[in-house]
Amino acid sequence: MFHVHHIDTLDDSPDLAPYRTMRRPLGHVKDRLFVAEGDKVVQRLLESDFEVISAIMPENCLAALEPLLHARPENLPVYIVPLRELDKMVGFHLYQGVMAVARFPTPLSLDQILARSPQPRLLLALDGLANAENLGVIIRNAAAFGVQALITGETCATPYLRRSVRNSMGTIFKLPVVESPDLVAALRALRAAGVKCVAAHGSARALTLSQCDLRGDCCIVLGSEGHGLSPAALEACDEHVSIPMALDVDSINVSNASAVFLYEAARQRGRM
């Protein structure tokens, strides 16, 4: 159920605060809220079981989303504002002007993820990723290649940042997430449960990707954009695995690396 409000300013109403403060995401994270931006992303949010708090859009975008808005269980306010005015209100240009505010899902534990993921499990863990755009692309790759859950470490940005949600194209709404307070402990727990932890890392002991068996239960572990995996995370993994590259290139972007690793896992499992 939804009700429409025509507005011409993002005034002091608490309901509109997340839109006024889109450039200050740390406050959103503290409140366990996020902004979904773009018509496709908002559509996928409305199709999900995430709790939606409000939506805002130009009037010409309302008709396409009405069936999904009607189907929502919440008593949902939908704010209508001209796109040119919305740009002024938020302080930067919005291509479509369709946005919604939603709440982070209930946190999941590693035990819950293992219980609900059929074998052979394919998990993805992230250590120290700070760039929201990279994180969003990695999430989209994870959804494309059959990852069953994402595990983010204590030094990793939340996958529910606005730019991450946008770059994931809404696939974050289908991917279970464990926000681990101790990634090394989580990796050790996975190994104890029979899940092989594979560090995406070039080293003297590294296998090449084609030498690594990814057919059984496994978790691929990716490190930060600048420094890769921490020594502790590397030590917690079963294998170090690298992507063969030309001799004058020593690395590729972490989001690209995720696509290569996850494609190989899907290929070995007969999905590609």
Image (tube, rainbow, N blue to C red):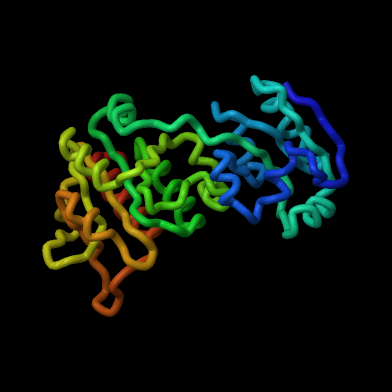
Which quadrant of the view contains residue 175? top left
- Residue 108 in sight in this render: yes
Left or right of 234 on screen, residue 68: right
Depth order, front residue of 245/253 = 253
The residue at 50%/55% (across/down) is 132
Quarter of the figure with the N terminus:
top right
Which quadrant of the view contains residue 81? top right
- Disc tally is 0
Residue 210's place in the image compared with 14, above or below, is: below
Query: Residue lying farthest left?
Result: 205
- x and y percentages locating residue 257 in the rendered image: 34, 59
Query: Residue lying farthest bottom?
Result: 248
The residue at 56%/52% (across/down) is 163
Residue 180's place in the image compared with 164, above or below, is: above
- Residue 146 in sight in this render: no
Quarter of the figure with the C terminus:
top left
Left or right of 85 on screen, residue 103: left
Depth order, front residue of 179/46 = 179
Which quadrant of the view contains residue 182? top left
The residue at 54%/26% (across/down) is 49
Depth order, front residue of 152/207 = 152
The residue at 24%/40% (across/down) is 269
- x and y percentages locating residue 17 in the rendered image: 72, 43
- x and y percentages locating residue 186 in the rendered image: 26, 41
- x and y percentages locating residue 236 in the rendered image: 19, 50
